[in-house]
Amino acid sequence: MLKVVCGVLVLHAVALATELPAPAEERFHQDVAWSPDGHWLAFSEFSGGEYKPEKWSVWVTRVDGSERRRIAEHAMYVSWSPDGRRVAYGAERGEGWGLFSTSLDSGITECFTDLQHKDRQPAWSPDGKHLAFVSDRSGASHIFVLTFGTGDPVQITGDTLKDYNPQWSADGTRLVFYRGKPEGHDDVYIVAPDGTGLRAVTLDSALDIFPCFDTQGGVVFASRATEEAPSLLVRINSDGTRETLTKAPAFFARVSPDGRRIAFISGQWPKSAVYLLDTQDSTITKVIN
């Protein structure tokens, strides 16, 4: 099971502390997302103890860790709707995984897919009209895009290798994802939402996974140089230059809508925590676990 996720960058790199406050309980947090207004976080959590898939759940909380509430059980991988009113996630129901969203106002849950496949890792487009996700409906794990109200999802990647973790650019014209490769040499790719313009961002011997776009068109991802090395957050700028963003091991960082804070996850299975980094003064606060 992969335990590292993607990162997003603010306008300038900030070095993280070498040591972080440790997670308090045996709970694992897999992913985190900011609400569009920057006041809330959504995240996935494993409740600890013996591993069972049904122990995963999706939660929301204010950025200070208060008013925490669970919105879905047996679910993980979150994406906030652009209007801030719903959270999308993947959830196992029966023998299949489907894509759902839950209203934060009414609690009403909507199912987007037919539960006949393994549909996971949803990513809501910036205009709210599309949902990119990972599915095995073509036989292997590839990227699909669902346009709301128009019918069946459209497959946009295809290869003998498996694809994961689609994330949209801010203007909605590109998706970034990673492709699993032999011997752990996974690489990052970019593709248009219609499947055209596929190109590699990384082609190296590192494990490069869970990418996101930053606000300036660069790509941030978790990179592990060797099997023994820690996973650090790395940015490849739009001009091709490369920067390491973290000193402490970290994964799945997301920048706040105003660019002043980064929510990121650090830890090792079965314990991890969500932290907030203030990009102005470099202070770090643990907000979840």
Image (spheres, grey):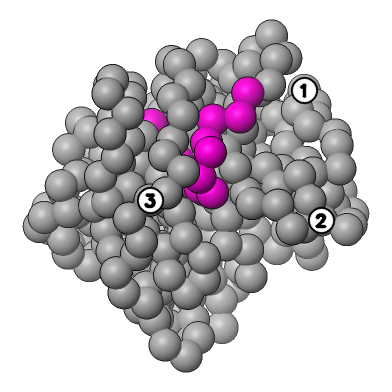
Mark 2 belongs to which amino acid? Gly
In the rendered image, which residue does mark 3 sit on?
20
The span picked out in magenta is 243-257
Sequence order check, earlier mark of 3 and 1: 3
For the residue carrying disc 2, how many other residues have a C-alpha within 10 Å: few (<14), some (14-19), or many (20+)? some
Classify mark 1: helix, strand or loop: loop
Q: What is the spatial separation of the Cα atoms under label 2 and label 3, in whole angstroms? A: 27 Å
State yes or no: residue 42 in magenta. no
Q: Residue at x 37, y 73 (%)?
A: 27
Q: Is residue 140 above or below residue 157?
A: below
Sequence order check, earlier mark of 1 and 2: 2
For the residue carrying disc 3, how many other residues have a C-alpha within 10 Å: few (<14), some (14-19), or many (20+)? some
Mark 3 belongs to which amino acid? Leu
Q: What is the spatial separation of the Cα atoms under label 3 and label 1, in whole angstroms? A: 40 Å
Indicate the position of residue 86 as horizontal and vertical percent values: 26, 48
Mark 1 belongs to which amino acid? Gly
Q: Residue at x 29, y 40 (%)?
A: 284
Q: Quadrant of the C terminus?
A: bottom left
Mark 1 near mark 2, Cβ–Cβ under 8 Å? no
In the rendered image, which residue does mark 1 sit on?
197
Using the rendered image of the protein, determine whether residue 52 is visible from the camera's viewpoint.
yes
Indicate the position of residue 155 as horizontal and vertical percent values: 70, 45
Q: Which mark is residue 184?
A: 2
Label 3 vs label 1, nearer the camera:
3
